[in-house]
Image: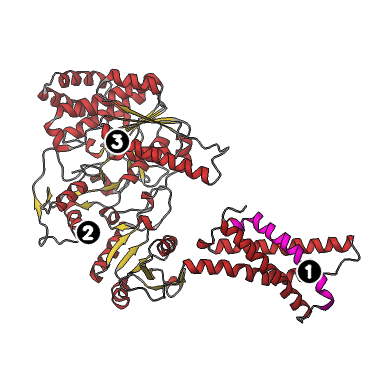
Amino acid sequence: MFRSASAFRFLGIDALALTVSVFIAYALRLERLDLAEYWRSCVLFAGLALIVAPALFALCGVYAQYWRYASFYEFSLLACAIACAGVVLTGIILLMRSLFSDIAVVPLSVPAIFAMPALVLTALPRLSMHSRFHPSSRRHPRDGSNRVLIMGAGEAGAMIVRSMRDARRDTVIVGFIDDNPRKQGIRINGVPVLGDRRDIPRIVADYHINEVIIAMPSAPGKTIRDIVAICEQSGARTKIIPGIAELVDGRFSVNHIRDVQIEDLLRRAPIKTDMQAVGALIAGRRVMVTGGGGSIGSEICRHVLRYEPAELIILGHGENSVFAIHNELQQWLNASRTSSDSDGSGSGSSRRVPILRTVIADIRFAERVHSVFEQYRPDIVFHAAAHKHVPLMEANPVEAVTNNVLGTRNLLDAAIVTGVERFVMISTDKAVNPTSIMGSSKRAAELLVHHAAKRSGRAFMAVRFGNVLGSRGSVVWTFKQQIAAGGPVTVTHPDMQRYFMTIPEAVQLVLQAAVLGQGGEVFTLDMGEPVRILDLARDMIELSGLQVGRDIDIAFVGLRPGEKLFEELFLPGERYHRTGHEKIFIAQDAGRLAPPDVLALIADLEEAALSGDTQRTVRLLHRIVERSQMAPQQMPCDDRTQAPADMRALAVGGV
């Protein structure tokens, strides 16, 4: 009821305000200041008001609000409590009149009149506290202050204004910029909307703006790119808050403001994840993530943990990365428990507390894999462990086979024996008509997943990824290192194009596939327009505050072994269509392309790889891929559900 000392202070202030309000109500009712014979009635009503109103304030939660951050909700709560007090006081007066004939008469109109000054006099102290900590942006700033313009006068922009006023005392928020004509000239939290994006250069010059913050979490990359270009012309620094997909809880704060990154320029509308379905799938289950310390694996772990599994088993070969993600997730769990306890939801709550398990294991060793599965008996497996670097695997085909192919087979065998219900393997676009060892090894792994789905009748499926922004070893990661080293930035070919997806997008695709898959399918994401790698390199150099040719050069080095100018999403025999999620495609019967003798072919491949016969290993790997492409072709896609034409020619690319 009273959670802080400020609540008790407000109780005292309210007592005085209510007493004065009673006198004002009588004075207005009688149209004079001398109450004469109504003094006894006034004292009686004041006593009732001092009991009823504070009790209703406490019941409605008025004293539990933190008025420093008050908004319309808090003041409407206060008004509701005052109105209820007026109704209750009227009822009490009517009851007392019927029971006691000699009691001092209280005019029935007094409670209604009382409510108006009571609302004003109780709101004013709270409003003064709110204004004290939220000064108007029009006040004269101190010298050297940071003058900020916010692009986007929506919910995110308003929240950033409130956060910055508290957290950054040396920052002056000069105004908003918004392209919506209906918002021009209005004020939001006391901050005016000064124009649209075309006005940024003029406003930056007129108001001496130092920094423009883009607060548009749902804006596509094309819009962000245009705004950044305008801001660069104006000379102001450009900051941004992340897109919705990067904020798991969907909340914004001043801590989220950062420099514009290449991911922002390539941003798409966020995938609408069916949170309820994913939660129903994961909650209370034992979930294993292989490659849990990697870029994709660790992000899968972060998302899975929020759906409250019974256990999360993080399996990886690199002890340092597994240790890091375990510590991060454990700290998050501890913070969640502390937060639940502090807000009173911890005691008696049905909230599950997931158990974190860490397993250091090499999936190439079948006995070790079976032992781990027998010990933890997972219900759902997300298989993200793999060797993924194309040039490295060209030089080390045996390692690609033992890890990507045999490791996947070992996991599938253990999953079938121990009753795993759902198995989602992370594949790659390079598995489609592969020209590289890495792509061929992932195609062979896909065939094993399809075969396991067919013989077990369970929901085992594959998800094809391409170039995932932010993952270690990706083209963006490589370019960042080259820019930091002073260049040159190396591009293989001026015409190379790739589709891109962010790590959060990739993980949401995995989670949705786990829900949608019935067994033997391949899922992939509609990734919008392709991006030239040359344009990507230029954008990254410019975002670093440098210029191409003056500060850093771009060098063309030619295609590396195993690389293609364009990647593909689906094989000719895979019939694909959109799912219930418009951004996700599915090849529903991709498993029909798996050769019936795939296990015998893999056995021969295993013998060659374990004996170290590189040439035979490569030859057998190519034979497996060729056999899968010799399967009977299906009818082409249904015109009503087929992917866009450019999706059939291009796909997510890698370095």
Q: Nearer the viewer, mark 3 or mark 2?
A: 3
Which residues are drawn in magenta? 36-63
User: Disc 2, disc 1: CB below 8 Å?
Assistant: no
Number of residue marks:
3
Label 3 to label 2, Cα distance in Å?
29 Å
On the image, the x and y values in percent for residue 273 come to 42, 45
Q: On the picture, is 509 further left or further right than 30?
A: left
- The structure residue drawn at horizontal position 20% and vertical position 55%, both measured from the top left corner, is 540
Residue 79 figure quarter = bottom right
Note whether 269 is above or below 194 in the view shown. above
Which of the 4 image quadrants contains residue 452? top left
Q: Nearer the viewer, residue 289 or 468?
A: 289
Q: Hey, what amino acid is under mark 3?
A: Gly
Q: Residue at x 69, y 67 (%)?
A: 18
Q: Can residue 340 be spotted in the picture?
A: yes
Q: CA distance from mark 2 to mark 1?
A: 71 Å
User: Which mark, residue 543?
Assistant: 2
**Residue 477: x, y in percent?**
21, 47
Circle 3 SS class? loop
Per the image, the residue denoted by label 1 is 43
User: Residue 596 is drawn in which quadrant?
Assistant: top left
Location of the C terminus (image quadrant): top left
Front label number (2 vs 1): 1
Q: Amino acid at mark 2?
A: Leu
- In the picture as drawn, the residue positioned furthest to the bottom comes out as 32
Residue 75 among those drawn in magenta:
no
